[in-house]
Each structure stands twice: as C-alpha cells, then as structure tokens.
Amino acid sequence: MEQVKTINHLGQVVYQESVEFYKEKLSVYSKDFLQNSLIPQLYEWSNAYKAAVELTKQKAPEGGKETKMEKILRGFNGASFNHLLSEEEKEAFKKIIEVLSKTELSVIQINKVLYSVDTELYKVAMNKSLRHLKSNQ
C-alpha cells in the first residue's frame, strides 16, 4: 500500500499507511478495546487513530483536541459507576483523576494507577458491606 504524508503533533513530516489500511488491520479488535485501550494511546493526526474512531463510530472531539482528562475518563470508568462507594469516596477518586491528569504520566500509566486504586476502594467497600450484613444478623 502507498504511504501518505502527514504532519505530526511536533510539526514534523511523517509517512504512514492510509486510514483504509489501518481500518482493515484494526477491524479484528472489539469496539471496547479500540475505545478504551487503543484510541487513548494514539495521536489524533495519525491514520490509525482516524481508522479506530471510524470503526467505533466515535466522532473526534468537537472544537479540537481531546484533553488528557477526557482521555483518562474515557479510558477508565470503573469507580465512577461503583455503587458500593460512598459519595465521599467517589469525590476523592475524582480528585485523584484530576491530579493525575496534570502529571507527566501517560494516559495508560494513569489508567493503571486508577485501576489499582479502584480495586482497593472496591475491597474496602465490600468489607464494609460484609460487616454491615454480619451486624444485621
């Protein structure tokens, strides 16, 4: 296949495969994998990003580039929907996401940290629920 010339996020000229090439290669992956694992790692100027977005029928963010915080929230949605967490714990988790989004860590590294925190919060919430059930017996 013929490579196409593109300007990357650093203003450099790069050559890459076409969007159609990437759509063919990425079509074997699930929509969930593309949305939550692949897209957050790609640059919007890349044809791989454009292909993944087309395959998931997700539109590129309006008004320009997606923020790091938006990528993190799109890639990680565990604790925000965890019904076992108190409102205070949910708010604390949101603050952790906000702080991490301002660091030099990549979106993938941040999501790994968030999954670890979410796992621990879930364990705490489960233990609270079990204690509550035992105390009602």
Image (cartoon, helix red, strand yellow):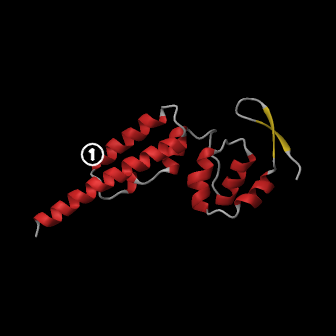
- Horizontally, is 130 left or right of 123 in the view? left
Residue 32: where, in percent of width, then height?
Answer: 57, 60
Residue located at (11% from left, 67% from top): 136
**Circle 1 — which element?**
helix
Q: Residue 42 falls in which quadrant of the image?
A: top right
Residue corresponding to mark 1: 88
Q: Position of residue 44 (x, y in %)?
A: 68, 42
Residue at coordinates 74% horizontally, 35% vertically from top-left? 8
Picture residue at 26% right of the left edge, 53% below the top: 124
Residue 6 in the image, given as x and y percentages of width and height: 80, 38
**Residue farthest along the top direction in this orientation:** 11
Query: Residue 78: where, in percent of width, then height?
Result: 42, 54
Task: Please tell me which residue is depicted at 39% across the width and 56% down the height of the picture.
Answer: 81
**Which image quadrant is residue 9 in?**
top right
Residue 70 seen by the camera: no
In depth, the one of 133 and 70 nearer the eye is: 133
Amino acid type of the residue that numbered disc 1 sits on in the rendered structure: Glu
Quarter containing the C terminus: bottom left
In this picture, residue 50 sits left or right of residue 123: right
